């Protein structure tokens, strides 16, 4: 199967990742790749409906995680899996690392439970495929929670996560650091405290180092 590339973007709220995703999409298109831009929770009508609930309705941590994985499975089956099968590059704003960071480290849910759910929700996406679908690369925008809070201060009305206290984001940031330590090949840390242009350079250099920005890097 001519499988494409699956690249995810992570970081605490306010880390500034979103503005860099379009930049990477342009660079990949410049290298001749077909790019699909998407986000989690979301990316399908069902998953966008679940996103609205997750971000705005009161619920406990286990309900959050059930909704996040339900949205993810629909997204994988309807959008991500088919796009990868066609050979596209899928750029996804957040994925399962966010569940480990927010619901695991942030809300205190057991990591073993999340690992089990990850395996169940991300397996059997493509036909005859009993492997767990995992990103090829994750760009982790790492920023101290105090800096992120200052950047978010002027933003639009906060959702259920953005309105959490800084201590929550300290746990989430630690959750990302722990995930990165467990998957150092997949997760690439970007120092998001630098100037925007330098942040973009780190991101583009990391992707180029894998050979994915060369015009001849794919069939
Ligand atoms: P975010 O990606 O930051 O979008 P926006 O830039 O529009 O605010 O918002 C998604 C929020 O959902 C973010 O606070 C993290 C949270 N989230 C989880 O708690 N668990 C998850 O599994 C995912 C994917 C996101």
Image: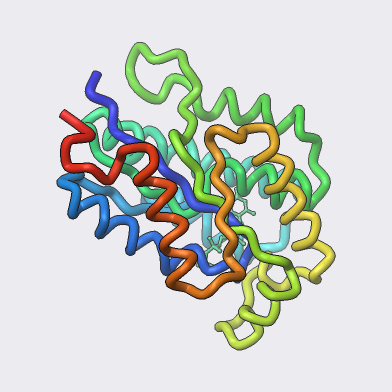
Asked if residue 103 is positioned above or below residue 120 in the image, the reply reads below
Q: Is residue 3 visible?
A: yes
Q: Is residue 157 left or right of residue 199?
A: right
Q: Is residue 44 above or below residue 122?
A: below
Q: Work out whether residue 41 can be spotted.
A: no
Residue at (33, 63) in percent of width and height: 23
* Quarter of the image where the C terminus is located: top left
Residue at x 62% of width, y 79% of height:
152
- Measured as percent of width and height from the top left, residue 95 is found at 52, 45
**In terms of depth relative to the viewer, which is nearer, 86 or 15?**
15
107 relative to 133, above or below: below
Q: Nearer the viewer, residue 144 or 71?
A: 144
Q: Position of residue 140 (x, y in %)?
A: 56, 52
Question: On the picture, is 99 further left or further right than 130?
Answer: right
Q: Residue 174's spot in the image, x, y percent?
A: 76, 51
Q: Nearer the viewer, residue 185 or 123?
A: 185
Quadrant where ligand 1 appears: bottom right
């Amino acid at each position: 199967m001519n499988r494409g590339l699956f690249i995810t973007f992570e970081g605490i709220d306010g880390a500034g990742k979103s503005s860099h995703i379009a930049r990477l999409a342009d660079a990949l298109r410049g290298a001749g790749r077909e790019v699909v831009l998407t986000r989690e929770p979301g990316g399908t009508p069902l998953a966008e409906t679940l996103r609205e609930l997750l971000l705005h309705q009161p619920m406990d941590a286990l309900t959050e995680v059930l909704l996040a994985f339900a949205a993810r499975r629909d997204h994988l089956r309807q959008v991500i899996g088919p796009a990868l099968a066609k050979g596209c590059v899928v750029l996804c704003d957040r994925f399962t690392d966010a569940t480990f960071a927010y619901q695991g480290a942030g809300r205190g849910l057991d990591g073993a439970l999340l690992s089990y759910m990850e395996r169940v929700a991300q397996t059997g996406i493509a036909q005859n495929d009993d492997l767990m679908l995992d990103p090829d690369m994750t760009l982790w925008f790492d920023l101290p929670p105090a800096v992120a809070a200052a950047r978010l201060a002027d933003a639009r009305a906060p959702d259920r996560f953005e309105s959490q206290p800084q201590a929550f984001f300290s746990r989430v940031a630690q959750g990302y650091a722990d995930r990165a330590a467990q998957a150092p090949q997949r997760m690439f840390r970007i120092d998001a405290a630098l100037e925007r242009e330098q942040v973009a350079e780190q991101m583009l250099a990391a992707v180029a180092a894998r050979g994915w920005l060369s015009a001849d890097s794919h069939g």
